[in-house]
Structure formats: structure tokens, C-alpha cells
């Protein structure tokens, strides 16, 4: 742009720019982002308005650097927070971290009490991985937070630092910033909880446990340190559970107790989890979720009568106060109750119970259908499950795929292939259909080159899927390529120690005269899934001395 221009031409240009860029013009005026209102800004002169419009026009014409420079200059001249905010936004959109930081710092210096300005500085520094430089804006962020919001601000700090690479340095910075709050009665518990979480991120588990101790000492009833102890317990840190049980003895509610149950289940301590749930239901018999988890746990452990009683109790409570969560819970509970009936041979009654599940919309109708299909599959009712899907699958490719798998169970191979090819035609990236068709051909020793081509196609969509890798190993075995088959199957088994993969890997080893290794793999498969059909068929056919 050449300057100066004659006055008449300058104002004509301003008018043209105003017409072209008015809709992109940021709102100006010193409305502060911390909620206070300053006096109207009288510094927005004609010249300044022209600079703003020219900046926006440069942006429209694909010149972000020029647009940023003009708008930041306008922000500095007018001291306007909206213009500072716009300058930061432009720099971020242009992926200019340094430019965004420069604009945010200029904004924060002009408006030192503006929380948003300071927060922008903090976030940009962390995005640029400048951890040490984040100390002062973090301190300022805490200082500017209103008293009633400070605990929430403290609790969010670990999220801010989640993506930085040097976790130990981040932990040190956060600990320094929180120093004044670690001894204050109203913030100590939350501050120590945040320090503990930062220590976990830097793999300092002993330090995190020490933070639990100091946080609970500061406020025995605070949830933060107890939840931190639960997190450490889930990571199997010695001594963490003692702090959890200590917190449980002091707190009246059930939220922490239910969180404790979830960790126990994750650790596969099912007996302890059941005992805790029974204690919770005695303390609060109307807590529906506790009955659902207890019933589900009893169901998985084969305690059918106890599971039925607990699930029935949940259904009664959830029906009294329906909600979105209770609708999902009711579906889960009634499905498991139906399975309990089916275990007793009462398939008709089980299907009737599922038929009573909520079906007020398409999603619920689909869930009910899948629940009934799964019930029938679990009890080898292949024909009934196939007929149910045939009547309801429509153009739903997931349901068509399920129907194809049932056709395979019924030995209706042509129908299975027809369904799978229809799925592929509707969605060429549906890799499970390629894999299923390829494996089916390989397993029956038919059209092996085509089978391999289908499986390789599936792997292009899901290269790390162990079951597809297993299929590739199996087709290579059928083709007589034992070395290649062994390589693929070993990789698949390493990624997923599944009983069916164990059956295939063991058979390849057996064929290669490595019987001891084959037997070891088969034993591992039996230990995880003794009733797996493929493994049982393999053992019956080869008759190894297990």
C-alpha cells in the first residue's frame, strides 16, 4: 500500500473498505472479560477504524501476518480488549504461537486484572512447552480467581499441564505456584490433591501418596485426597488403600464408596467388591445403582439366585424414578434377568422379558433387538436368532453382518457370502466383512488366493487388529506357507492371547514338529477359555497328550 494518498481518495478508500469489511469488524470498546465494564473508549478515531478495517481486509485476502500486525497495533493504540482478543485469535488460526504469545502478553500488560488475558498467556506458554515461563501467569491465575472459585481453578491445573513433555519440571512449577495454598485451611486439601496428581504424571508415586496424607490431614472430609488415593490404589501403589478406607470411615455419603467398588472390580477383587456393595445397600437400600452393580457382579460369578434378587430390586427402584440413566440400567438389568431365565431353560419367558424393554425410539428398538439376538446366540438358538434378524435388519449393515455370522453357524455358506458381499457393497470400508468372508473361505480350504486377498484388504483398514492378523496366518497355513503363517500367528497371539488364536498357532507349531511348544500354547488357551469351540475341535482332531 502506497502512502500518502490525497485526502479525497483516502476517504473514498475508507468508505470502500467499510462497505467490504463491516461484517468482519470486531466489537470495540473496553468491555473487560472479567465481567467489569470500563468507560466507553474514545480512542476509536477515524484513522484507527480505518486501520482495523484494513487489517480485516488483509485477512480476507489471505494475508494473516499483515492483518495481525494492523489489529495488534490498533489494540495497543485503543487499549481495547476485543481487539487484543481478535489479534490472539488471528495468530492462533495462523498457527503462529510466538505471535499469539506476543499479543496475549500485550493484552495482559494493558489489562493486568483481566483473567482471560492472563489465561491466554498461560495456555499459549504451555502449548509452546515453555513450562518454566508459565510459573508467573499460573500464580496470577490463582490470585485473580475469586475466593469461591479458587478450589475449582486449583483442581483444573493438571489438565492445563497434561500435554507438556517435561512432567517433572511441570510438577515443580505447579508446586511452587501452589505454595501459598498448601497450608490454608480452605484450599489445602484441593492444593495437595493437585500436587499429588502432578506427581503421578511424573511417576512419583511415593510423592503422590505423601500428598494424599497431607491433603487428608488438612481436611479429613475432603473428597479430593480420597479420590487421589483411589487413583493410586488403581495403580497398585502400596499403602493407598489404607487412606481410602480411612476416608470411607469419615464420610457419610455413598459416592466414594461406589468409586471404591469400581476400583475393586478393576483389580478383579470381586469378593471384596461384593462385600462393599452389600454394606452400601444396607446403609442406603434405595440406592438403585448399587443394586445394579451388585446384581451384575453376582451374575458374572454365577450366583444366579442372588443376582436375580438384586436385579429385581434395581428394576423396582429404577422404575419408580425413571431417567436416561435408569433407562440404560433397566435394559442391562432386564437383559441379565432374561439370561438367568434362559440358563434355566426358560427361553420363551426370557424373550418375553426382553420384549418388555423400552423401545420408545429407534436406538432403543435396536438395542432391544440386539439384546434378544445375543440371548439366542448365547444359547445356540441359531435359527431363531437368524429369523429375528432376517425380519428386522433392513438396510442396517451391522445387523446384516450379524445375520451373515448366524448363517455361517447354520452352515448356509452361500447365504453368508451373499450377505457379506451386500455389506461390502453398501460400505466398502467395512473391514470385518472382508475378514469374515476371507477367513470362512480359508477355513473351508476354498478359493485360497481370493481368501488371502480379502483378508489383506481388511488389514489395510485395521493393520493392528490381532484377529485379522490371525486370519492372515490361517490362510497362509492353508496355502502351505508355514513360516509366514507362524510369523503372523505369533504376532496375533502376542497382541491378543485369545483361545482361537492359540488353537491356530498351536496347529501350525504341531505341523512344524514343534509339539512341545504347541502343547504349551494350547494349555494357555484352555486356561483362559476351556470351552472355546475352535480350540476344542483342534484338540479332538489332533489328539495331543495334554
Image: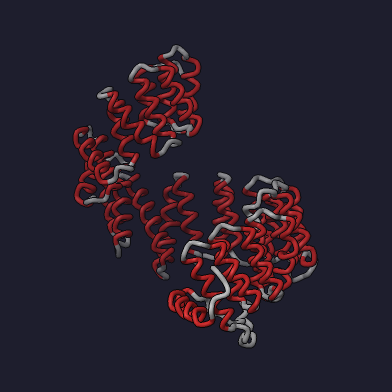
Q: Nearer the viewer, residue 275 or 506?
A: 506
Quadrant of the image occupied by residue 42:
bottom right
Residue at x 38%, y 26% (from the top left corner):
536
Q: Nearer the viewer, residue 341 or 530?
A: 530
Q: Residue furthest top?
A: 513
Quadrant of the rendering where the N terminus is positioned: bottom right
Residue at x 34%, y 24% (from the top left corner):
475
x then y, percent, for residue 8: 50, 82
Residue at x 45%, y 57% (from the top left corner):
310
Q: Is residue 235 left or right of residue 422?
A: right
Instruction: Please say if 241 is above or below 412.
Output: below
Instruction: Please say if 42 is above or below 64.
Output: below
Residue at x 39%, y 36% (from the top left corner):
460
x then y, percent, for residue 447: 25, 24
Q: Is residue 15 left or right of residue 471?
A: right
x then y, percent, for residue 426: 25, 46
Amino acid at each position: 500500500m502506497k502512502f500518502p494518498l490525497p485526502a479525497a481518495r483516502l476517504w473514498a478508500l475508507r468508505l470502500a473498505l467499510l462497505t467490504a469489511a463491516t461484517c468482519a469488524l470486531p466489537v470495540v470498546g473496553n468491555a473487560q472479560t472479567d465481567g467489569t465494564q470500563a468507560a466507553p473508549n474514545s480512542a476509536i478515531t477515524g484513522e484507527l477504524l480505518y486501520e482495523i478495517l484494513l487489517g480485516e481486509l488483509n485477512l480476507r485476502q489471505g494475508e494473516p501476518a499483515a492483518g495481525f500486525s494492523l489489529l495488534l497495533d490498533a489494540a495497543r493504540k485503543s487499549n481495547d480488549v476485543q481487539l487484543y482478543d481478535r489479534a490472539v485469535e488471528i495468530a492462533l488460526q495462523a498457527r503462529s504461537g510466538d505471535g499469539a504469545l506476543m499479543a496475549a502478553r500485550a493484552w495482559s500488560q494493558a489489562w493486568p486484572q483481566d483473567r482471560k488475558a492472563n489465561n491466554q498467556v498461560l495456555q499459549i506458554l504451555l502449548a509452546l512447552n515453555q513450562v518454566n515461563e508459565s510459573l508467573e501467569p499460573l500464580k496470577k491465575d490463582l490470585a485473580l480467581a475469586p475466593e469461591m472459585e479458587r478450589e475449582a481453578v486449583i483442581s483444573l491445573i493438571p489438565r492445563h499441564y497434561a500435554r507438556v513433555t517435561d512432567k517433572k519440571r511441570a510438577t515443580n512449577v505447579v508446586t511452587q505456584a501452589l505454595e501459598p495454598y498448601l497450608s490454608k485451611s480452605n484450599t489445602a486439601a484441593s492444593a495437595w490433591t493437585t500436587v499429588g496428581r502432578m506427581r503421578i504424571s511424573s511417576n512419583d508415586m511415593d510423592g503422590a501418596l505423601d500428598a494424599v496424607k497431607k491433603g487428608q490431614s488438612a481436611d479429613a472430609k475432603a473428597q479430593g485426597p480420597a479420590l487421589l488415593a483411589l487413583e493410586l490404589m488403581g495403580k497398585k501403589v502400596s499403602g493407598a488403600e489404607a487412606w481410602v478406607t480411612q476416608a470411607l470411615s469419615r464420610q457419610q455419603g455413598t459416592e466414594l464408596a461406589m468409586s471404591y467398588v469400581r476400583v475393586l472390580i478393576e483389580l478383579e477383587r470381586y469378593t471384596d467388591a461384593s462385600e462393599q456393595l452389600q454394606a452400601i445397600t444396607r446403609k442406603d437400600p434405595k440406592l438403585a445403582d448399587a443394586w445394579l452393580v451388585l446384581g451384575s457382579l453376582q451374575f458374572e460369578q454365577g450366583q444366579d439366585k442372588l443376582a436375580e434378587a438384586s436385579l429385581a430390586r434395581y428394576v423396582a427402584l429404577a422404575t419408580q424414578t425413571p431417567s436416561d440413566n435408569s433407562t440404560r440400567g433397566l435394559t442391562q438389568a432386564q437383559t441379565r434377568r432374561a439370561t438367568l431365565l434362559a440358563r434355566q431353560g426358560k427361553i420363551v419367558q426370557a424373550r418375553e422379558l426382553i420384549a418388555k424393554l423400552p423401545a420408545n425410539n429407534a436406538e432403543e428398538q435396536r438395542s432391544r433387538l440386539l439384546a434378544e439376538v445375543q440371548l439366542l446366540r448365547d444359547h445356540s438358538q441359531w435359527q431363531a436368532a437368524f429369523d429375528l434378524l432376517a425380519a428386522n435388519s433392513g438396510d442396517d449393515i451391522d445387523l446384516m453382518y450379524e445375520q451373515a455370522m448366524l448363517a455361517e453357524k447354520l452352515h448356509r455358506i452361500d447365504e453368508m457370502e451373499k450377505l457379506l458381499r451386500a455389506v461390502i457393497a453398501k460400505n466398502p470400508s467395512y473391514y470385518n466383512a472382508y475378514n469374515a468372508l476371507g477367513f470362512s473361505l480359508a477355513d473351508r480350504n476354498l478359493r485360497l488366493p481370493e481368501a488371502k486377498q480379502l483378508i489383506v484388504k481388511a488389514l489395510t483398514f485395521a493393520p493392528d487388529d490381532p484377529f485379522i492378523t490371525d486370519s492372515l496366518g490361517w490362510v497362509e497355513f492353508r496355502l502351505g506357507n508355514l513360516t509366514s503363517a507362524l510369523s503372523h500367528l505369533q504376532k496375533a497371539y502376542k497382541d491378543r492371547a485369545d483361545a482361537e488364536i492359540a488353537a491356530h498357532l498351536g496347529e501350525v507349531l504341531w505341523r512344524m514338529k514343534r509339539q512341545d511348544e504347541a502343547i504349551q500354547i494350547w494349555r494357555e488357551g484352555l486356561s483362559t477359555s476351556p470351552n472355546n469351540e475352535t480350540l476344542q475341535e483342534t484338540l479332538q482332531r489332533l489328539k495331543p497328550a495334554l
